[in-house]
Image: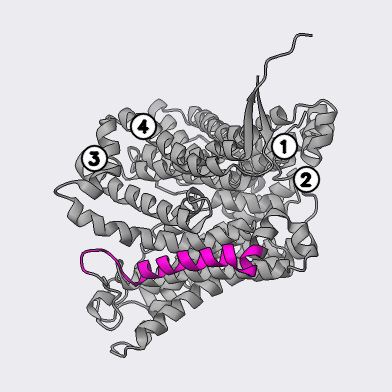
Amino acid sequence: MDPVLLVASIMVSATPILLAALGEMVVEKSGVLNLGVEGMMITGAVMGFAIAVTSGSPLMGFAGAAVSGAVLSLAFGFLTQYLLSNQVATGLGLTLVGLGLSALIGSHYEGQRAPALGKLDMPLLSDIPMLGRMLLSHDIMVYVSLALVAAVWAFLKYTRAGLILRAVGEDHASAHALGYKVVRVRMAAIAFGGACAGMGGAYVSLVRVPQWTEGMTAGAGWIALAIVVFASWRAFGVLIGAYLFGGVTVIQLNLQAAGTTVPVELLSMSPYLITIIVLVIISARGVQGAPASLGRSFHASS
Amino acid sequence: MIRLEKRTQPSGYWTALSPILAVGLTMIVGGFMFWALGKPPVEAIRTIFWDPLFHPQFADYSRPQLLVKAGPLILIAIGLSIGFRAGIWNIGAEGQYIMGAVSGAAVGLAFYPSQSVLLFPLMVFAGALGGWAWAMIPAVLKTRFGTNEILVSLMLVYVAENILASASAGWLRNPEGMGFPGSRNFKQWSAVYNAELLTGTGMHWGVAAAFIAVIAAYVMMARHIQGFNVRLTGEAPLAARFSGVSPAWIVFLCLGVSGGLAGLAGLFEVTGPAGQVSIDFGSGYGFTAIIVAFLGRLNPFGILAAGLLMALTYIGGELAQLMLGLPGASIQLFQGMLLFFLLATDVFTNYRVRMLRREAA
């Protein structure tokens, strides 16, 4: 098949997971495990779709999806950071709430079509043979997601705020003793993660499919969680993981369309099987780089 | 200023009170939600929680449904609660439920049209084995390689759904079904049909198994050394290890029990209320059971009550859909909110809330 089209479609299929996984990586860097990525993604998918259809502007849709993902994640944040609830259970609850909420809102929008997000054709650059169409003729969100990878990497590595965020994630008691506001830092990280997951979801409903069907994220949020582990909590690792995964998805979809002798069900389960295999390889090698305070509640005793 | 003070022990009083508070809060917020959807809030809440049991016209039909829906929820939640106590998060019960149904049905259909009395017990065994085997995948990966059981068990749900799709459209399809997807109907095969045991109650073998599981889980957790070890592992992992409890064994025990029970639930469902292996067999019981386990405070008798309540919201939700045109998804949201409020109100169980006045400097 056409390699130009292949690479271009891998980039499209990887973008939702890239956005969600990048957000979750920042959340986990601050020491919080939010298992509600799937719920925030699906809510972002439906809110983004609804807003884009109503306003006629896909960009408004993405903005709305980011806001709704962040709002939902702050509910998780309030429970885990202020009411000190169990992070695993609360994250699961967030996913269940998100799935219900999205199905409720989405029932009005089934069968409609989203306004198209235009390709961002760059003068001259997009006309470069092969490379131009392959890499430089995408919609704006693909570039936003790539820019966000670089931004998150630089933020965590070079800025003071990034250092504080990492400190909070590694040892919340010491960070607290130094006078940093552990809970506030974490709430900010959680909101960022929610916004990213929301945008990732909106990319599924507005660009990749592009229409609304119930449960359409189909586990992408969980795969994003796996990619964070795969990436050893590094921004460029997330990029590689998301694009590899996008590649697997595109190849299995193409094989399905080509009508090979391999059963369709085996092909559609392959992304999940590959995720498991990758998780096993990573863990057998020894998971590296997990923030030391990941998943632990912080309660200041003084 | 409000301060939280950690209790040395969870408050017994609040452990019992917070689920009630959470149900109340869910009713209030849910009422607002129904109102926002343009439905009469009080009537909607009454339709969900009261009418299935006491409505003069519908109660006769819906009351038996209570046990039909509660059976699988309780059976799965009992298994999950044991793992949750030990800090082992099996969230792929939906996949184990599907695999139990598929493997049990496959064994049964291999002997079609036998009328042997041994066939149904064999299928029950195969169902439990199927769910158990599916849960052993995350267990082996966790103990052997340290792979996160949350992600693996969840990924396996999607794999199981695809196996279910291929079974119902392919290798388990009814050869006399004119090419339509779906297996033979167990309701028309008296030897293996999991019928009501007592007419008009909804009580089938799965419900009986759920009641037995409640008692067995209570005995295990409260009286047996294995239950003690499970609780110890959850509350003080280091102490458990020093006292000689093998962490790997606890993983196998917790995932094995929850997988086996979920598989049983699937088998009883496919041979009973569902009637056949079909593409839409997976109905989300495996996920709702997570809410049931927490709402029941991970306590077997609490889970019994929580399972009945959750079954009520299913039936009431269907009734509200019929009578008030309430969207089906609103019940799903309602159930999710219940878990959220429960986790929120649990702050009172583990912490004491103190009001502090700012001291004059």
Q: Observer-nearest residue: B259 or A233?
A: B259
Nearest the eye: B190 or A73: B190
- SS assignment at label 2: loop
> CB of mark 4 within 8 Å of CB of mark 2?
no
Q: Earlier in the sequence, mark 4 or mark 3?
A: 4
Q: CA distance from mark 4 to mark 3?
A: 14 Å
The chain letter under disc 4 is B
Distance between the alpha carbons at the discs numbered 2 and 3: 48 Å
Q: Earlier in the sequence, mark 2 or mark 1?
A: 2
| Residue under pointer 4 | B33
Q: Quadrant of the C terminus of chain A?
A: top right
Q: CA distance from mark 4 to mark 1?
A: 33 Å
How dense is the environment of label 1, judged by Cα within 10 Å: few (below 14), some, or many (20 and up)?
many
Q: Amino acid at mark 4?
A: Met
SS for callout 3: loop
What mark, if any, has residue A291 been given in the picture?
Answer: 2
Is residue B134 among what the camera can see?
yes
Q: Nearer the viewer, mark 2 or mark 1?
A: 1
The amino acid on which the numbered mark 3 sits, given as a three-letter code, is Gly
Q: Where residue A194 sits: x, y (%)? A: 59, 36
Mark-to-mark CA distance, 3 and 1: 44 Å
Label 3 environment density (alpha carbons within 10 Å; few <14, some 14–19, many ≥20): few
Name the residue at 36% across, 86% down.
B119
Letter of the chain that mark 1 sits on in the rendering:
A
Magenta stretch encompasses residue B215: yes
Residue A176 vertical placement versus A217 (above, below): above
- Residue at point 29%, 78% (across, down): B174
Query: To which residue does mark 3 refer?
Result: B325
Amino acid marked by disc 2: Pro
